[in-house]
Amino acid sequence: MMTTSMACPKSANTHSQKATLSETISGINRRSFIRSLAAGSAILAAAKTSKGTTAPAFQVGVGYSSNPYTAASTALSACAQFPTSLAGQTVVIKPNLVVPKPSSSGATTDPNVVKAIVDMCIAAGATKIFIVEAPLPGNGPYWGPCGYAAIFTAKAYPQVTLTNLVTGTYVLTPVPGGGSAYQQMYVPSIVLEPNTFFISAGKLKTHVDAVATLSMKNLVGLASEPAYATVPADTDLPRHDLHLRSINQSIIDLNMIRPIDFAVIDGVWGMEGDGPTAGTPVATNVVLAGLNAVAVDRVGLNVMEFVQNSAEATYVTYLDYASEADLGPPSFNDVALLGDTYTPFPFVPATVPPILWAPTCTPNTISISAGGSTTIKYAIPTECFTHAAIIQDNDVTPGVTVIQTLHTFKAVKSPGESLTWNGLNSSGSPVAPGVYYAQIQAIPSPSNTANDNYAVGRITVTA
């Protein structure tokens, strides 16, 4: 499998909006950091607009109905962005089927939402459509429990193939611009084939690590479980390595490798509380659709009434990274809504770890023979307890090795701290040349080490 080519709605409050963050936090220019992810990426360059010019409005279609097919069809048509011709193209649709439960659980994408997408694809001339997902380790495909097998039969939909990614081929693929958490990642070859139109059909729900899982977070399901699992495999976090580096940075890397061509969020039934699997179902009766995944996700947060302010627990870090990299709008206010109106529903957030920004390492290359050292700075919006270490974690054979602990858990006040590493291991010996990471772990208190967040900064060591 793995090679290096690897075989109901409440009354609303006013619309919430994202507060503008300070350009620089504790001397760390986050814009410079995140823009480095996009350097040299032709894919992203096409999405950028010049400063001072008038950019076209980001459009998101809204369908509001308790009928999933109706809501989805309305959203897809209303956005006026779904392609009119898919003739000759392969369509890959990635729903969120993380557990074998129906969509009314709030955990999985409704098959009738995907049916509406498929029907639009067929109307646009698509003759080859793959619906793809990777079930949890040790489990078979969830097509039956999630309602897909009953709808997408060979007789009713000869164009559609239900595809289990776990049994397919994963390819070690470079992250455009050099990446953040990873420089290269194992992703399914099916989404990398030329002339492929990729649709993320995410779910409107909370997440205990990433705050919300919408269309961009949905791409975590593309990462190879065999490559990124812990040993023994962790069934709660089947791709644990992504968390140990940084789930927020990893989400951006995956979206850089395979940008979403069209984004849909199923919120007919959403989930609040401790999602993505153990929360409470919420009938919000909304489906969102559009070309820009960041825009669609920001509307999703507005539906949930999640205030986007870095001092709030409902702040979605990966969306800020995405906007800083010019992948989409920085605010819900930058999005034009088309189609139906909706009533925002104040979702109960998940119990999430402290917000932690990716550290910067200056310089990011040091020489052992020259006695070089690097200054590591990271930012936190609120006081928490952090652990700092230098680790190695190879992209080809992922697995964390601690090289040196810079400090164990201690209370750190906002805006953060500055640390120094001189290229030595825990025994005081120089490390071998290679790639290392400054890994920061943040927890709310010493008694709550399970509710944690990670972020990394890359350091290259030369002889």
Image (cartoon, rainbow, N blue to C red):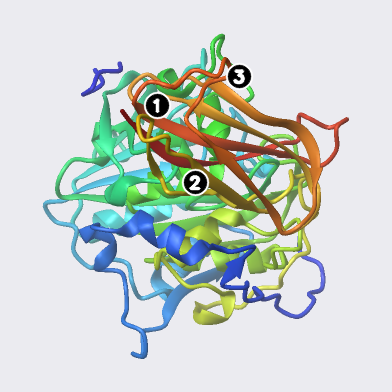
User: For numbered disc 3, what is the local secondary structure?
Assistant: loop
- The residue at the far top in this view is 232
Q: Gap in Å between the C-alphas at discs 3 and 1? A: 14 Å
Query: Image point 62% across, 76% down: which residue?
Result: 20
Q: Quadrant of residue 76?
A: bottom left
Mark 1 surroundings: few (<14), some (14-19) or many (≥20) residues within 10 A: many
- Label 3 sits on residue: 235
The circle drawn on residue 453 is none
Asked if labels 1 and 3 touch by Cβ distance under 8 angstroms, the answer is no
Residue 235 position within the rendered picture, expressed as x and y whole percent measured from the top left: 60, 19
Residue 303 position within the rendered picture, expressed as x and y whole percent measured from the top left: 66, 66
Q: Gap in Å between the C-alphas at discs 1 and 2? A: 16 Å
Asked if one can make out residue 146 in the rendered structure from this viewpoint, the answer is no
Mark 3 surroundings: few (<14), some (14-19) or many (≥20) residues within 10 A: few
Asked if labels 2 and 1 touch by Cβ distance under 8 angstroms, the answer is no
Instruction: Give the mark nearest the N terminus, 3 or 2.
Output: 3
- The residue at the far front in this view is 370
| Lateral position of residue 42 relative to residue 1, left or right | left
354, 68: nearer the viewer: 354
Instruction: Give the mark nearest the N terminus, 3 or 1.
Output: 1
Callout 1, which amino acid? Ser
- Label 2 sits on residue: 249
The circle drawn on residue 224 is 1
Q: Gap in Å between the C-alphas at discs 3 and 2? A: 22 Å
- The residue at the far left in this view is 88
Callout 2, which amino acid? Gln
Q: How many numbered discs?
A: 3
Callout 3, which amino acid? Thr
Report the quarter where the C terminus lies. top left
